[in-house]
Image: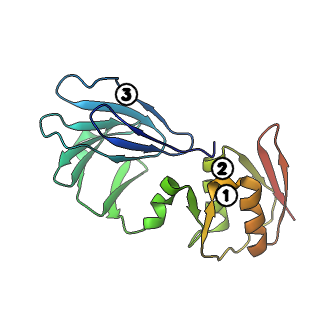
Amino acid sequence: AGQRINLTLQDGTSVWLNSGAEIEYPALFAGDTRQVRLKGTALFDVSHDAGHPFVVETYACRVEVLGTGSVRVTPHDAPQRQVTLRPNEKVSLHDGRLTLGRADDPNEYLWTEGLISVSGCSFEELLHRLEHCYGVRFDVRLKEMPQFEAVGKIRISDGIEHALDILQRNCDFEYAYDSQTNEITIYR
């Protein structure tokens, strides 16, 4: 929790793993494809090898790098609904359907630099990001979520309590942190 790692695979592919992510890969790629398995969030800079496609298997999809900037995403439960991405596009999985969109928010990738963007986030969305990043669980005991409007970034390495202190500057709440259970109660 609260960690990220950069590693280079045997073929020269660079991989950033976000907090809580797991990757399974062979020591040496053999066969027609270079295949890895991923749980969680990762950013890949795939080494070019036209003769050996790079494939990422997730719980829901198969992601294949096609080269020249395109990527094919195929859902395991509906292979006929595959989507091909071009540069600056992203795909989201909602209710079993792939939705194509623009990848135009550079803040989504700040985690590779050890930062969390708070710009444009709701209070609830930010708590979700903090849960993922720090491996904590929030128990929110508020009648309604505070209105949160801030611009900026939080350095992950400064810790969860620092992040919560920053949130308290913009929102009216108190918190209690149980380090034994990694649970944070949010209240007024």
Q: Position of residue 105 (x, y in %)?
A: 42, 68
Q: Which label was assigned to residue 131? A: 2
Question: At 63% across and 46% down in the image, what residue appears?
Answer: 2
Q: Nearer the viewer, residue 115 or 141?
A: 115
Are dots 1 and 2 in contact, CB under 8 Å?
yes
Q: Dot 3, crowdedness within 10 Å: few (<14), some or many (≥20)?
A: some
* Callout 3: SS: loop
Query: How far is mark 1 from mark 2, CA to CA?
Result: 6 Å
- Left or right of residue 158, residue 98 in this image: left
- Of tags 2 and 3, the one toward the viewer is 3
Question: At 17% across and 39% down in the image, what residue appears?
Answer: 49
Q: Position of residue 24 (x, y in %)?
A: 41, 28
Q: Which label was assigned to residue 25? A: 3
Looking at the image, residue 165 lies above or below residue 13? below
For the residue marked with disc 2, what is the amino acid? Answer: Glu
Question: At 61% across and 49% down in the image, what residue appears?
Answer: 133
Residue 140 figure quarter: bottom right
Question: At 22% across and 43% down in the image, what residue appears?
Answer: 80
Looking at the rendered image, the quarter that the N terminus falls into is: top right
Q: Nearer the viewer, residue 165 or 175?
A: 165
For the residue marked with disc 3, what is the amino acid? Answer: Tyr
Q: Position of residue 150 (x, y in %)?
A: 64, 76
Q: Which residue is mark 1?
A: 127
Which of marks 3 and 2 precedes in the sequence? 3
Looking at the rendered image, the quarter that the C terminus falls into is: bottom right
Q: Position of residue 50 (x, y in %)?
A: 13, 40
Counting every numbered tag in the picture gives 3
* Callout 2: SS: helix
* Callout 1: SS: helix
Residue 146 figure quarter: bottom right
Query: How far is mark 2 from mark 3, CA to CA?
Result: 27 Å
One can see residue 140 in this view? yes
